[in-house]
Amino acid sequence: MSAEWYPIPLVMMRCSRCCTFRTARNRICTEGRSSIRLGSQDQTVARKMLGSIIGLLILIGVESHEIASHQMARVLPEERLGSACPVELNYGPQCICDFWSYETYNIYCNASSPAELDTIQQTFDQTPIVGHYEVKISLTAPMSIPANMFSSKTAAFITFECRGDGVKLGTIDPQAFIASAGKTSAFQIMSCDLTEFDFAFLAQLRVLETIRIADCTLTTMARMPLMPHMRMIELYSPTGLREWYDPAQTPFLDTIIINAAKDTDQDTMETIVDTLLYYTNSLLRLYLVNLGLTRIPPTTRNFTSLNTIDFSENQISTLPSGSLAFTSTLNSLWLGNMPLQNIEPDAFQGNYRAALVYMVFGKLTTFPRETYELLLEQMIYASGSIDIYGNPIVCDDCHLGWLINEKRYLLTRVSGTCANGTSFDQLDSQAYDTRCQKSIGLLTKASSLLVILVNLADQN
């Protein structure tokens, strides 16, 4: 999963150049009409002339701003997601500004020294825009973040990124974002050394709901303040994670994502999951992805409210009986993209009626009755289903007879393909039955012959 974060919904359309200046154009035209009274024909001609002049002025301003912005973008390499901000909004020399529809401003800054960080602080002090959607500051050298970083301005999403090997994010002042305390709902740190990092500054963000830490060295999260509004924490590719924080500091957390942790072994991860039992009755979504797990952490079966759980991309090859005996009502269970080749009978236990079970791109070669029949019988009465696409299921023997012939109605709850690419629901029932009857006949004859040979051996 990519570490790059775009909090603005991708479905939001980029605003066009004309939309950017529509408000200003309407204001100028309104002012013109209030001060000049002409005949209807003269008004039409005047409006056309005025529109042409204004359009030309706007175009000149836009092009000048685009040139300046692109020059700045070369200094501050950052993919622009929206349109250039209006020319009068100058965030240089350390920042560039993107403008989206609905008066949405995103600011991207670079700092290689405390002096440049001071310049960024002065830029926010001078800008007339109070509310920003995202502010991202990229640091190319270790430094701390001072008080009133955004002056009296606010940001809904704040990102700090470290560029360069081993760049350490220093102390963030408890008053760094005090003006944004009631506005910031998400905070992200990327590619920084967070060894012994103090998260106490987050306490000032009283409506913070999401923390995301990506590609950081992070051995402990113990220094976490009380954040009653926190709902989700995301860790992507943390290096050296050994210790979680006291869950009582985020008492209403409902979503936890830990993805691709480096240098964190199975026992450590199970200890972390044990710590999360504080949320036994409240955790809704748990993602333990690409962690090198070789077994399902047993504690995960104790969460009573989980509706989504993801074990994708781990190293689990066998699911023993009871390993997926969850006490909650699942909506989705992810077991894909790992070397899963054996699922024992009764591995699935609990309420799977509405669950979507994804076991795609594994190494399963069979779909045995004793493992899946009761599971599918649950699902037929609700919206549950099993997806095993991409597994090398062998279909030229008779182990699928129970599904293809006896209980073909359950095929509506299975999305699977044979090793040769044939979909389960394309297997011909009559041909399958004929082939299996021949196999059964040969097996019966072989058994009878074996009995005869045994009797002869006993007589001799």
Image (cartoon, rainbow, N blue to C red):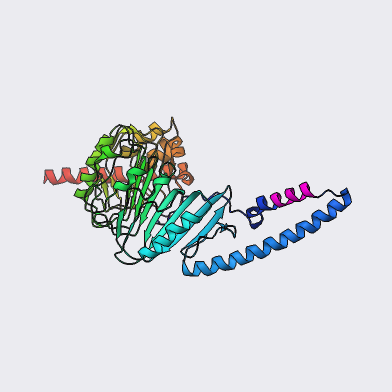
Nearer to the camera, 114 or 414: 114
Rendering coords of residue 31 (x, y %): 73, 49
Q: Which residues fall within the magenta stretch? A: 26-35
Rendering coords of residue 315 (x, y %): 28, 53
Q: Is residue 33 magenta?
A: yes
Vertical comparison of 318 with 84: above or below:
above
Rendering coords of residue 20 (x, y %): 63, 54
Nearer to the camera, 118 or 385: 118
Vertical comparison of 134 with 280: above or below:
below
Rendering coords of residue 151 (x, y %): 43, 51
Helix, strand or loop for the magenta stretch, by majority: helix
Vertical comparison of 430 with 74: above or below:
above
Q: Quadrant of residue 307?
A: top left
Residue 440 seen in the figure: no
Q: Quadrant of residue 347?
A: top left
Q: Quadrant of residue 459?
A: top left
Nearer to the camera, 254 or 106: 106
Q: Is residue 323 magenta?
A: no
- Residue at 43% x, 60% y is 120
Quick one: quadrant of the N terminus? Answer: bottom left
- Residue at 48% x, 65% y is 93
Vertical comparison of 60 with 33: above or below:
below
